[in-house]
Amino acid sequence: QYGLNQQEVVLNGHTPTNLQNDIVIGTMLGDASIPWNKKGRQNKYVFAQKADRKNYVQFIYEQLKPYTINYLESTCLGPIRKNGIIVQNAGKPCTAHRVYTLCCEHFTNLRHQWYKNPYQKKSLKIIPNIKLNWTRFFFWFCDDGNNNVKKRTITLATNCFIESDVDKLISLAKQDLALNGSRRDWGTGPLIIFGTKDYDQIMTQLQNQAKQFNLEKTFMSKLNNDYEHDYKKYKSGKSVEDEKRICELRAANVSIEAISEEFGLSRSTIYRIVK
């Protein structure tokens, strides 16, 4: 009526804060995405997690205001691997919490930075010209990180990026945070591993960030304190037939993630079973 669009009314000239930039970059390294939209239309940011991470998603929703306009809880079918191919919406029902922003120029610009072919519906995610800091590293870890207390290693899953971009991330961690990471290639894609030399520094920084943002529960969910206990718990409650089936699926190149989802077990337990 007054010649104003939603972007102008909701944002009212707002520009992203430093924390909002850190959250978006950290989660884009992890589970967030900026989906394709028809050419000529603006893009939005989307972030989703499983039901047990509701508090984390709510935090993202609140911190990204006024960009965030939708918070949804939905039940959908999870992914499953068939004949070596991930099939979406074909697994067990699961509850997801999702955050959507409005479509606006800011995220359209980021779509062009983070995707190789921004006008294509299915485009490769790439690493733009960014810097790392501990806040960005923290949100990346909350999405895709894992802490092995026994081995004193920190692992970041990077299977949504090609190897050259994973190497770029390793260089950024060295340049910006003085961390010495290495790339490991697994069946599910490349990983970045930080070893004993950097372990105490990383843990201290992550704990400080978790306390600052009141996300201790989210941080603790990423700690694998006792692989042996997890395995024994599995052995006491699962049948030999289940273990045999897990080994058969892995031998058929079904991903650890898909097996974990199907049987409700941690990835560390699956690795232990099939090793």
Image (cartoon, grey):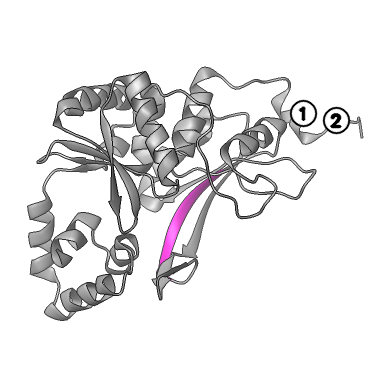
Above or below, 120 relative to 250 = above
Q: Which residue is mark 2?
A: 4
Where disc 1 sits, the SS reads helix
Mark yes or no: residue 40 visible.
yes
Q: Which residue is mark 1?
A: 9
The quarter in which the C terminus is drawn is bottom left
Task: State the image coordinates of residue 11 (x, y, percent, origin top left).
Answer: 70, 26
The answer to which quarter of the image holds residue 138 is top left
Residue in the image at 35% along x and 43% along y: 144
Mark yes or no: residue 213 visible.
no
Residue in the image at 44% along x and 49% along y: 160
Q: What is the residue that sits farthest to the bottom in this orientation?
A: 241
Residue in the image at 27% along x and 68% along y: 263
Q: What is the residue that sits farthest to the front in this orientation?
A: 164
Task: State the image coordinates of residue 61 (x, y, percent, origin top left).
Answer: 52, 36
Q: Is residue 236 left or right of residue 75?
A: left
Prevailing secondary structure of the magenta residues: strand
Q: Amino acid at mark 2?
A: Leu
Task: State the image coordinates of residue 36 (x, y, percent, origin top left).
Answer: 66, 49
Residue in the image at 31% along x and 59% along y: 187
- Report the span colored magenta: 91-99
Looking at the image, how many numbered discs can be counted on the residues? 2
Mark linked to residue 53: none
Task: State the image coordinates of residue 141 (x, y, percent, origin top left).
Answer: 34, 36
Gap between marks 1 and 2 measured at Cα: 7 Å
